Image (cartoon, helix red, strand yellow):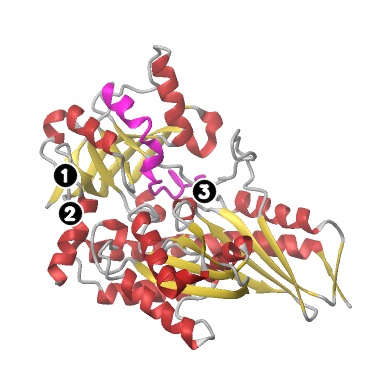
Amino acid sequence: MEKHITLPLTEELAKTLRAGDRVFLTGTVYTSRDAGHKRMCEALARGEQLPFDPQDATIYYVGPTPAKPGQVIGSAGPTTSGRMDAYAPTLMSVGARGMIGKGARLPEVVEAMKKYSGVYFGAIGGAGALLAKCIKSAELIAYEDLGAEALRKLWVQDMPLVVIIDCQGSNLYETGPAAYLAQTE
Amino acid sequence: MREIDVSRITDTVERLCIEANIHLPGDVERAIEACRAREDGAIAADILDNIIENYKIARREEVPICQDTGMACVFLEIGQDVHLTGGDLRQSVDEGVRRGYEKGYLRKSVVADPIRRGNTGDNTPAMLYTEIVPGEQVTITVGPKGFGSENMSAIRMFKPSAGLEGIKAFILETVRNAGPNPCPPMVVGVGIGGTFDKAALLAKKAIMRPLGTHHPDPYYAALEDEMLEKINALGIGPQGFGGRTTAIGLNIETLPTHIAGMPCAINISCHVTRHKTEVL
């Protein structure tokens, strides 16, 4: 099913999304990957605030290329989400609900998604030039020293995504290939 | 004896780093388009359309195809009748990478230490391979390699008794384990034989070989076709969402090996398999 949705990703909105839905996402997302996640979780462990309000927030796992003159951002496709599995449940526990990336997640992430009504969206891995077209503004908000891994606030418009895992734990990586094989039998 | 100043190597590496990251090789584009024509998965066909649109945007607007502009794998085939002058070869290659990644607005993705990390800030050092060959030319190939797929690669030291069936099972196991992580559709490079290290290098060379070409030995050429078909019967599909197109190509490279062994390395690459070659 094709859906146009606008962020923030409230619990009510999250519960309407199902694995396999094709989604066009509009609104604010925050970028973070390996080193940024480590820092955010260390900050939370020290009792500090995150650089953004995590409530109903969506995090895009991306380390873009540098913007050329005149560009909002360089190429900006998703990185492999599994490396953020160690941190994702902690971020969901403080309110972050949406995750955009690619690749498999651990069972403990899926359990956290069921508990906190999280949604895991897939962007097309390797389609960095195409996805950059949906990013209308980019602002560096923290961890500038991390370069490509710095924390950025993005405004995205009609970003083409697929719901991979929904808040009930249904997983397109399991159902999609199985459905295809059944169709070809 | 022909003299070549290493500054020419710097200039060429710089240009190849930029061009390889912006222009997908024609053989890879043709393979993706042929797979799109055959794809019968619902989401899969749309994903392949987006992948094709992506590399067309990159080419038109001169931006990187993928944000993971990779580690710069540089292969130099140096003619034995060439005398390299004007400086240190290793430094000249790294300088080319440094300039290319800066001028081309490419991402700097290299850390100085594997455990303690710390970005080097200029994407150096290059992963440099040199080979001395007959003649008086220098052939330079740059293959920027992303790590979403590199991380899904594998190597195994088989007993010879494992035979062909062992190799086949290992290829399918590695692709199945990789699943959606390496941004399928993938390119699969298989290196069989040699030593532990040579098998891995063969696998890397296999992903640099143009798609649609075959191993010169008909035995391995047939194995390439058979394994590509078997991979595409797994149902993983583009991005792992289900479909026919799990891999757009599979190349095998081989070497003689020891009586006691049968090393096999599998280097996984993605649909943005980049390589560009120039001869000096």
Q: Which residue is mark 2?
A: A175
Residue type at mark 3: give it: Lys
Q: Disc 3 or disc 1, which is closer to the eye? A: 1
User: Which residues are the magenta region?
Assistant: A66-93
Which percent across, then down, holds residue B116?
60, 33
What residue is drawn where x is 55% and y is 50%? Answer: B106
Residue type at mark 1: give it: Ser
Mark 1 touching mark 2, by CB under 8 A? yes
Q: In the picture provided, is B35 more to the left or to the right than A73? A: left
The answer to whether marks 3 and 1 sit on the same chain is: yes
Residue type at mark 2: give it: Thr
Q: Chain of mark 3?
A: A
* Mark 2 vs 3, N-terminal side: 3
Q: In the picture provided, is B67 more to the left or to the right than B258? A: left
Cα separation, mark 3 vs mark 1, equals 40 Å
What residue is drawn where x is 12% and y is 35%? Answer: A15
Q: Chain of mark 2?
A: A
Q: Which residue is mark 1?
A: A170
Residue A79 vs B178, above or below: the answer is: above
Which percent across, then down, holds residue A160?
26, 51
Q: Nearer the viewer, residue B108 or B241?
A: B241
Q: Give SS at disc 3.
A: loop
Residue B137 placement: quadrant: bottom right
Q: Which residue is mark 3?
A: A68
Query: Can residue A140 be seen from the camera position used here?
Result: no
